[in-house]
Image (cartoon, helix red, strand yellow):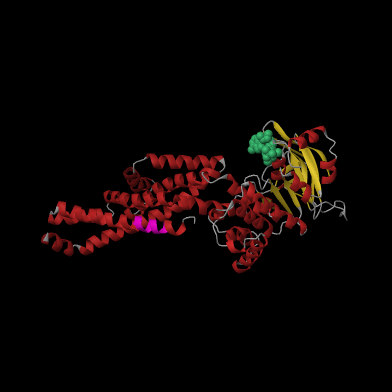
């Protein structure tokens, strides 16, 4: 499908530089460097505990990090420098920056007190300040795009896992984020529901959305990505176009990892 | 029986006045106590430690003190400080403080039982802390809180009888005054008991209707 390295703009949309993150005394991310260009789809693979989720959470400012920087469209997120000191931004600024990235979670995390449309509308109304009618129209458009036009007024509890996850995707994308983060969004789904969600993501990728995703679905990673990144012990161990990474892996841990996954 | 009906009819204005007092005391204490309780609950869960500590101390002291003591304290203590509260105001203050502590604990529990993913999803959408609280956490907390909240409302109506000791002319005190005149002790206590029962039954029914309306579908 999409081929990498076509008309690369000078500046990546997302630039992660030397990112370090510890939980207590344990360093989880040990200097991660990663670029995502506008319109690119980057898949992160790697064994459990290698820090993939933590990396996405740092990008979306759900975790604090101790070193390095994350630049979104050139703007450092999460922290500012003042007199040589690194200070966490205030709640309001963090919220503004978070609104520029969308996030889809493994466990959907739909708001149970709101309908499908209500879930999509909340950010449009309260963050973007849209009027009710306009937000509703946008929500309906996005629900239609993920194939759920008929389910707009259903409560999350009335939807299947796959449908809930597609609402979550609509909720993230309706905000028109510059970048969408997806963390193992099919892991909590019954096998027969995985396909519909992956097809939705594939369609979005085809329409030019910039995606940074973590997945255990190797075939999906190969199909959808421009770039695949292999993380190992808190570092990017190897990266490249999916053909190279899956076809000609070099890092011994990657070779081992791919041998362990059945469907690549 | 005829006597009771005649006596009750003669005393209808007094009884009705007492009932209205009881209802307004309870309503005020519930509304103010709920607002206070939301603040206390949020402080207990998200407050910086000095605030959390203060909220914890407040909640524990209030819940550990008999309501009658609170009522007497609210009436007599401000006077020591040169502040004179009317019995009505003092009574409402005491019940509000009591109610706030209870609701605060309820809110704390309800907020604590909401999965972390809810906060994270709301933050990811771009909501600020107060946005997350107002649009995602509190609406969910209040729903799960509805049954115990209704219970608290009923408790407040019952607790309002304690205001009779500081001379607030609520239903119980008025009834006692009537009994003082006609000595129909048993009959009037039964009558007033039935009135409290009706009020609390109405609250419970209203609560159930509300629960049905806001239940997650
Ligand atoms: N809140 C936390 N507190 C302490 N340690 C944590 C926390 N979250 C994650 N970790 C640790 O950080 C490491 C990396 O976790 P992370 O969830 O990022 O891995 P992952 O690559 O996403 O794994 P998986 O494939 O299983 O999802 C793990 O060792 C985990 O135990
Ligand atoms: Mg993970």
Quadrant of the displayed image that contains ligand 1: top right
> x%, y% of residue B69?
33, 43
- Quarter holding residue B48: top right
Q: Is residue B64 left or right of residue A240?
A: left
> x%, y% of residue B212?
43, 57
- Quarter holding residue A120: bottom right
Q: Is residue B155 left or right of residue A141?
A: left
> x%, y% of residue B153?
37, 52
Magenta segment includes B209: yes
Nearer to me, B79 or B142: B142
Residue at the (33%, 55%) spot, across then down: B88
Nearer to me, A7 or A55: A7
Which span is picked out in magenta? Answer: B203-210
Looking at this rendering, what residue extends furthest in the bottom direction? A133
Would residue B79 be visible to someone looking at this image? yes
Magenta segment includes A173: no
| A243 relative to B32, above or below | above
Q: Is residue A155 left or right of residue B195?
A: right
Magenta stretch prevailing secondary structure: helix
Residue at the (80%, 35%) spot, across then down: A255
Residue at the (62%, 45%) spot, across then down: A188
| A132 relative to B54, above or below | below
> x%, y% of residue A96?
69, 54
């Amino acid at each position: 499908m999409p081929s990498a390295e076509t008309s690369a703009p000078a500046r990546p949309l997302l630039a992660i530089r030397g990112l370090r993150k510890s939980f207590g005394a344990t360093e989880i991310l040990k200097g991660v460097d990663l670029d995502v260009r506008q319109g690119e789809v980057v898949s992160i693979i790697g064994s459990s505990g290698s820090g993939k989720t933590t990396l996405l959470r740092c990008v979306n400012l759900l975790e604090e990090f101790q070193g390095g920087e994350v630049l979104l469209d050139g703007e450092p997120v999460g922290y500012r420098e003042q007199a040589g000191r690194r200070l966490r931004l205030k709640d309001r600024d963090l919220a503004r920056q978070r609104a520029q990235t969308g996030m889809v979670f493994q466990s959907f995390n739909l708001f149970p007190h709101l309908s499908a449309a209500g879930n999509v509308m909340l950010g449009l109304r309260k963050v973007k300040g849209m009027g009710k009618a306009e937000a509703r129209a946008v929500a309906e458009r996005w629900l239609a795009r993920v194939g759920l036009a008929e389910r707009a007024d259903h409560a999350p509890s009335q939807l299947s896992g796959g449908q809930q996850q597609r609402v979550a995707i609509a909720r993230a994308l309706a905000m028109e984020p510059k970048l969408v983060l997806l963390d193992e969004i099919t892991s909590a789904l019954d096998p027969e529901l995985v396909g519909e969600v992956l097809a939705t993501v594939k369609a979005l990728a085809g329409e030019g959305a910039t995606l940074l995703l973590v997945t255990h679905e190797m075939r999906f990673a190969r199909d959808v990505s421009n770039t695949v990144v292999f993380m190992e012990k808190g570092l990017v161990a190897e990266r490249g176009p999916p053909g190279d990474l899956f076809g000609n892996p070099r890092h011994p841990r990657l070779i081992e990892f791919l041998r362990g996954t059945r469907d690549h | 029986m005829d006597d009771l009906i005649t006596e009750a009819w003669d005393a209808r204005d007094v009884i009705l006045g007492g009932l209205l007092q009881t209802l307004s005391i309870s309503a005020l204490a519930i509304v103010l106590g709920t607002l206070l309780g939301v603040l206390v609950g949020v402080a207990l869960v998200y407050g910086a430690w000095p605030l959390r500590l203060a909220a914890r101390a407040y909640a524990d002291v209030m819940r550990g003190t008999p309501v009658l003591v609170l009522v007497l304290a609210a009436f007599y203590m401000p006077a020591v400080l040169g502040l004179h509260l009317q019995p009505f105001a003092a009574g409402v203050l005491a019940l509000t403080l009591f109610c706030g502590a209870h609701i605060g604990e309820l809110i704390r529990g309800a907020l604590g039982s909401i999965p972390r993913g809810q906060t994270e999803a709301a933050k990811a959408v771009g909501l600020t802390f107060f946005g997350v609280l107002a649009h995602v956490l509190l609406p969910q907390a209040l729903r799960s809180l509805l049954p115990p909240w209704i219970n608290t409302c009923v408790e407040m109506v019952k607790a309002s009888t304690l205001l009779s000791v500081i001379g607030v002319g609520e239903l119980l005190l008025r009834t006692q005054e009537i009994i003082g005149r006609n000595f129909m002790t048993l009959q009037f206590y039964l009558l007033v008991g039935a009135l409290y029962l009706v009020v609390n039954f109405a609250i419970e029914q209203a609560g159930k209707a509300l629960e049905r309306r806001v239940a997650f579908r």
